[in-house]
Image (cartoon, rainbow, N blue to C red):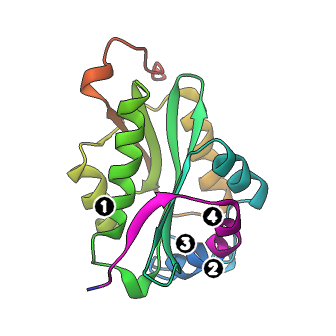
């Protein structure tokens, strides 16, 4: 078992994240993530902005090597899980769950009403992780997520879906309306 800790990312952690993202991309079947897209990663400036806003978490081993990360972006009052990746060699050790738990705790602590994400419909490990935390697949996504799904399809990604986690204690706050 890999020993690790979850913490907010430091600015000097950002440089390691692209390698984690590229390594994790190898887990997806080519029909979902074509080979020509596997080298694409989150823009460093977006990661730096998330780090500066305390919306970027990393999993590190005892040698301070980054094993995985989770990045959140805000869209109005709601949050979007922009990326969650773990090095394949460190998979199946609860790192993805621990990163997602940190994001969920952050959302609850800040009274964020809803956390959204997009993911592959046919990739069972991602679906299982998100469902374990209470995410539900949306039939109709809010406009900003519907636009993201269209962009992902145009880029050549396999079938993607939007998912939502509504924080029970924050229900009084608004969520984004879905398209009709």
Please give the range of residues in magenta.
Answer: 2-18
Say whether disc 4 or disc 2 marks the residue closer to the N-terminus: 2
Q: Is residue 13 left or right of residue 122?
A: right
Label 4 to label 3: alpha-carbon separation: 8 Å
Specify whether 128 is left or right of 38.
Answer: left
For the residue labelled by badge 3, is the local secondary structure a helix, a strand or a loop?
A: loop
Would residue 141 be counted in the magenta stretch? no
Identify which residue, 50 or 180, lies in the foreground: 50
Query: Who comes first in sequence, dot 3 or dot 2?
Result: 2
Percent across and percent down for residue 84 are: 48, 60
| Residue 138 horizontal/vertical position (percent) | 36, 36
Find disc 2 in the rendering and name its residue.
19
Q: Residue at x 42, y 39 (%)?
A: 106
To which residue does mark 4 refer? 156
Residue 36, image quadrant: bottom right
Return the disc, 1 or 3, that comes first in the chain's sequence.
3
Q: Which residue is mark 3?
A: 33
Q: Which residue is most to the top?
A: 172
Looking at marks 1 and 2 on the same chain, the residue that comes earlier in the sequence is marked by 2
Q: Which mark is residue 97?
A: 1
x then y, percent, for residue 23: 55, 82
Residues under labels 4 and 1: Cα distance?
28 Å
């Amino acid at each position: 078992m890999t020993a690790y800790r979850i913490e907010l990312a430091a600015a000097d952690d950002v440089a390691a994240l692209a390698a984690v993202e590229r390594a994790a991309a190898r887990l997806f079947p080519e029909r979902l993530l074509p080979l020509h897209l596997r080298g694409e990663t989150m823009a460093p400036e977006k990661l730096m902005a998330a780090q500066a806003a305390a919306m970027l978490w990393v999993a590190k081993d005892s040698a301070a090597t980054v094993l995985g990360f989770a990045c959140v972006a805000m869209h109005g009052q709601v949050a979007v899980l922009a990326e969650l990746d773990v090095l394949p060699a460190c998979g199946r050790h609860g790192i993805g769950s621990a990163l997602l738990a940190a994001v969920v705790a952050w959302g609850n602590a800040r009274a964020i009403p809803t956390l959204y994400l997009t993911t592959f419909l046919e990739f069972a490990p991602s679906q299982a992780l998100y469902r374990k935390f209470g995410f539900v697949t949306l039939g109709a996504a809010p406009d900003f997520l519907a636009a993201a799904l269209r962009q992902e399809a145009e880029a050549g990604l396999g079938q993607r879906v939007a998912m939502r986690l509504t924080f029970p204690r924050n229900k009084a706050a608004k969520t984004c309306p879905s398209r009709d």
